[in-house]
Amino acid sequence: MMLLVTGATGTLGRDVVATLRERGHEVRGLSRSAPGHVHGDLLTGAGIADAVDGADVIIHAATDGRRDDTATANLLRHVRDDQHLIYVSIVGVDRVPLPYYRSKYRIEQRISERGGSILRATQFHNLVRTLARALTVAPVGLYPAFDIQPVDTSEVARRLAEIAEGGERVELEDFAGPEVRSARDLFQVYLKSAGRRRPLLPVRVPGKIFRAYRSGGHLAPASAIGTITFEQFLASPPR
């Protein structure tokens, strides 16, 4: 198959491109300027028609916060009905009232109307490590007072490849990490791996968004399909 991957230079996109090539597929990675990829700009639409042309499957893994609606609209303008479009979303976009999540949920609906597939993933290990690093720089570290169910991008990439190869539309599927754990626990794991010690204090923020996280709106314990733990991720070579 010929596959196009948007967001090919991103955290997930890199793994998706590598996984598809390892499985013997011809892959175009979409990027604004990175060498070795087909060039196109989802925000302006420049080059998108040529990038999409000839692709059997399009995996839409690009994300740019508040501009995702525009980027997706520019992509959909060139996707044909006979091309399988797979969208990477986030578990909880329909339950956590974060503006970024609401945008993802709107896009899900557009993809669904076009007959595409939707895979929702929980937070990536990479994101948890980034948050832990940022919030433990000071002598007293902080952590959000809710649980997280991190998943490895390599496993999400493998599932996306399976959906692409299956040829059938996946209406909506959650793909979550193997464990639901407190952010405090995960941050302590990070500190230990980094050889650092810090007291940790919880952060609680009033409002609907934090309350949704506290209630587990971003979790999918019934879909704990991933197998790579946060400890295993931290012990693996940097990606």
Image (spheres, rainbow, N blue to C red):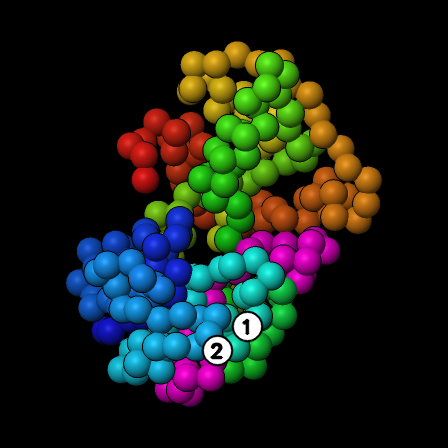
Which residue extends farthest bottom?
A: 81
* CB atoms of marks 2 and 1 within 8 Å: yes
Q: Position of residue 136 (x, y in %)?
A: 56, 23
In the picture as drawn, the residue positioned furthest to the right comes out as 206
Question: What segment carries the magenta color?
Answer: 74-102
Q: Is residue 202 left or right of residue 227?
A: right
Horizontal relation, residue 206 to residue 224: left or right: right
Q: Position of residue 175 (x, y in %)?
A: 49, 53
- Name which residue type carries label 2: Asn
Q: Is residue 141 above or below residue 236?
A: above
Residue 78 in magenta stretch:
yes
Q: Is residue 6 visible?
A: yes
Q: Is residue 137 above or below residue 205?
A: above
- Give SS at disc 2: helix
Q: Where is the C terminus found, in terms of image quarters?
A: top left
Q: What secondary structure is found at the residue carrying circle 1?
A: helix
Image: 205 above or below 96: above
Residue type, mark 1 in image: Thr
Answer yes or no: is residue 111 visible. Answer: no
Question: Which residue is pictured at 39% across the width and 77% down the height?
Answer: 46
Left of 167 or right of it: where is 192? Answer: right
Image quarter for residue 108? bottom right
Per the image, is 81 magenta?
yes
Q: Position of residue 203 (x, y in %)?
A: 72, 30
Which residue does the image show at 57% across and 77% down from the upper left? 110
Between 3 and 76, the one lying in front of the other is 76
Q: Is residue 109 left or right of residue 226?
A: right
**Which image quadrant: the N terminus?**
bottom left
Residue 70's label in the rendered image is 1
Task: Read off the residue under disc 2.
Answer: 74
